[in-house]
Amino acid sequence: MAAALSIPRATWQHFGLFTTLVHELGHAFAAILTGRVVRGIRIHRNHSGEALSSGRGSAVLSGALGYPAPAIVGAAQLWSVFNGYTAIALFAGGVVLVLTLLVIRNLFGVLVVLASAAASAGLWFYATPQVQSYALFVLGVALLVGSVRGLATVIGVHTRRRGHLATSDAYLLYRRTGVPSPVWLALFTIVIGGCCVAAVTAYLSR
C-alpha cells in the first residue's frame, strides 16, 4: 500500500504533493528553530514549493532540512506506531496542518493542506485504533519512500539536468555557504539513509 502511494506515477502525482508539503514544513521548522520568521509557504502543482523566511538567524539549517524532512517525519510516525503513540502522532500532525494554514500563501497550497488536514481529522474522529495504526504505518513508509525518490530527483538535477540547478537546495546551499553541492547531497543521503535504517530497526525490535 505504501509503495502504491509513492512509486506509481498515477498516485505519486497526488501523494507527492503531501511530500512536498512536508519538505517545505521542514524548511519552515528549521527556520523557526534558528530564530527566523516564516513569511510564507507555497505549494505548486508540479511538486515544487517555497518556504520563505527572514530574520537574523542562519538560513543554512533551514535550507538543509527540506529533503530530509519527509524521512524524519516518516521514521517518527513509524516509531509512534511501534511504541503505542499513534493517537498522539495523529493529533500532533493535525495541529501542525491547521497551523500551516496561517502561512500558506497560494490557493493550491491551501487545498493541499486542507485535504491533508481532513484526512487526519477523519482518522482521528472516525477510525478505530487499529485502522489509525495501519494508516500511520502506511503513511510513514510512503514518506520514507518519497524521501528517497526526492533525493534521487535532486541528484539527477546535479548529474543529468544541470539546467535546473536553481531548483536544488544543495546548489542554493552551495551559493550561500561556499560548501560544494556534493557535500550537501551526501548529507541529505546520510540523514535519509539513517532514518530508513532507524525505521527498519524499530520494526524488527518490536
Image: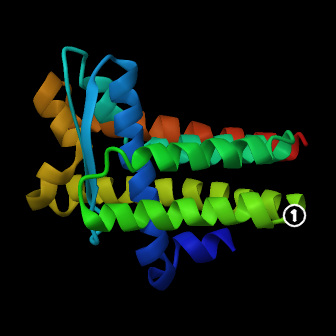
Question: In this rendering, would 22 be left or right of 76?
Answer: left
Q: Residue at x 56, y 56 (%)?
A: 143
Give left or right: position of 136 versus 190: right
Q: Nearer the viewer, residue 150 or 123?
A: 123
Q: Residue at x 33, y 33 (%)?
A: 64
The quarter of the picture where residue 140 lies is: bottom right
Q: Is residue 107 above or below residue 95?
A: below
From the top left corner, tell me how far across and down residue 100 is, in percent.
41, 46
User: Is residue 35 left or right of 118 when viewed as pictured?
Assistant: left
Secondary structure, mark 1, is loop
* Closer to us: 131 or 160: 131
Alpha-carbon neighbours of circle 1 within 10 Å: few (<14), some, or many (≥20)? few
Direction from residue 196 to residue 128 in the image, left or right: right
Q: Residue furthest bottom?
A: 10
Question: Residue 67 lies in what quarter of the image?
Answer: top left
Q: Residue at x 35, y 46 (%)?
A: 24
Q: Which residue is mark 1?
A: 128
Q: How far from the left and from the top, in percent, is residue 115?
A: 50, 68
Tell me where residue 142 appears, x and y as whole percent.
60, 62
Q: Which of the image's four quarters has the N terminus?
A: bottom right
Image x and y of residue 199, in percent: 71, 44
Coloring scheme of the render?
rainbow
Q: Is residue 2 above or below residue 51?
A: below
Q: Nearer the viewer, residue 30 or 120?
A: 120
Residue 96, visible in the rendered structure: yes
Q: Quadrant of the C terminus?
A: top right
Q: Quadrant of residue 35?
A: top left
Is residue 196 visible in the rendered structure shown here? no
